[in-house]
Amino acid sequence: MRTGIFVGSFNPFTIGHDSIVRRALPLFDRLVIGVVGDNVHKPDMPKAEERMQAIKELYADDPRIEVKPYHGLAMDFAKAENAQFIVKGVRTASDFEYEQWQADFNRRLGGIETILLYTEPELASVSSSAVRELQHFGVDVSAYIPKKH
């Protein structure tokens, strides 16, 4: 079974993340979305269970997608899930440089390949941190949060 993982804190899960999931899905029989656990250094961050539940509800009708807690190294999570691939989204040149280094690390040390999917141009400015900043100032961010398909 061809399995990929897509990991992150997803605080919050945005339309950019949804785009990566939708575009990666045809490549796999199974895609596991790994949600980083609670961070004691960020007490205002929504609990991992809340973030996971929102993502599970979004993809409830697609049995190929699983949502699970994730801790540690992505390559270890990939191995635990019997995944051959890590899926990453890339928005900028600096994202690419970092992900290229990570991909080499995951391949050399873990034998796991990385698939980089470039952000759709209209979503290039969408990031979880930008959405959180807008929320902080009372801006309606519903346009940046995916709806169930």
Image (spheres, rainbow, N blue to C red):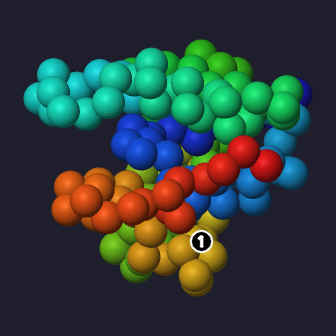
* Residue 55 shows in this picture: yes
Residue found at the very far bottom of the displayed protein = 121
* Residue found 32% across the figure and 30% down from its top: 46
Q: Give the amino acid type for the residue marked by disc 1 in the picture.
A: Tyr
Query: Looking at the image, is 122 positioned above or below residue 7?
Result: below
Q: Between residues 41 and 53, which one lies in front from this camera angle?
A: 53
Mark 1 packing: few (<14 Cα in 10 Å), some, or many (20+)? some
Q: Nearer the viewer, residue 134 or 93?
A: 134
The residue drawn where x is 53% and y is 54% is 145
Rendered view: 122 above or below 14:
below
The one nearer the camera, 134 or 10, is 134
x and y percentages locating residue 120 in the rendered image: 62, 76
At x 70% / y 26%, what residue is drawn?
66
The residue labelled by disc 1 is: 118
Q: In x, y percent, where is residue 40?
A: 15, 22
Q: Position of residue 118 (x, y in %)?
A: 59, 71
Instruction: Give the structural element (helix, strand or loop) at label 1.
Output: strand
